[in-house]
Image (spheres, rainbow, N blue to C red):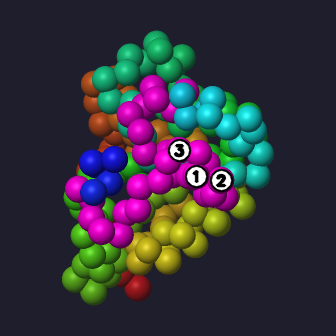
Amino acid sequence: MPQARETGPTVIPKPLDDALKADIVVLAVPFWQHREVAKAVASWQGKIVVDVTNAFGVALEELDGLPSSVVISRAPGARLVKAFNHLPAGILAEDPNVKGGRRVIFLSSDDESATASVGALVEQLGFAPIGRGKLAEGGSLVQARGRSWTQLVFQDLVKFT
């Protein structure tokens, strides 16, 4: 859990068993480790999984040509939302209030209710949630695939109201 300590004092590392008891689980692991996490719980029913992963370096053939979030969403009962993956952890750890606006977090999901719940969490953390539609469409704009980054990765955008 050294990565959590590096992120700052507000990140409280928990053993996987404890984390999986939460209603919202943030999946922030190297891409292929999602398989091990998926096996750690008998059912994902009723849980929202926030996919923070990127599949940089993973061959497109290994993903069957699908966005990485679509591959991860196959966990039985998972209500998956792609979020928080387009910015590096160091920027996410900074104050989300920037020059009179709020730093943007993109959300994509095939489950509107899960998107609303994660959007509320994004707001609570001080960021501005921006919906990007379903995983196959909007999710593909905020991911790394193969050896490339898509259009919105590393775009540190601010929303002004």
Residue beneath label 1, please? 18
Residue at 51% across, 32% down? 34
> How far is disc 1 from disc 2 in space, using C-alphas?
5 Å
Q: Residue at x 27, y 65 (%)?
A: 8
Residue designated by label 2: 21
Give the CA distance from mark 2 to mark 3.
9 Å
Q: Is residue 48 left or right of residue 11?
A: right
Residue at image position (54%, 17%) is 64
Query: The residue tagged with tag 1: helix, strand or loop?
Result: helix
Please state the total of marks drawn on the protein image: 3
Quarter occupied by residue 156? bottom left
The secondary structure type at the circle numbered 3 is: helix
Figure check: 17 above or below 21: above
Identify the residue position indicated by label 3 in the image. 16
* Residue 63 appears left or right of 127: right
Compared to 60, does 5 lie above or below? below
Q: Is residue 140 magenta?
A: no
Q: Identify which residue is drawn at 34% across, 39% down.
A: 150
Q: Label 3 is placed on what type of residue?
A: Leu
Kindly identify the amino acid type of the residue bearing the numbered disc 2.
Lys
Residue 138 in view in this figure: no
Q: Are marks 1 and 2 in contact (CB under 8 Å)?
A: yes
Point out the stretch of residues depicted in magenta.
6-35
Q: In this image, 113 relative to 86: left or right?
A: right
Query: What amino acid type is highlighted by mark number 1?
Result: Asp
Disc 2 crowd, CA 10 A, few/some/many (<14, 14-19, 20+)? few
| Mark pair 1, 3: CA separation | 5 Å
Q: Earlier in the sequence, mark 2 or mark 3?
A: 3
Is 10 magenta? The answer is yes
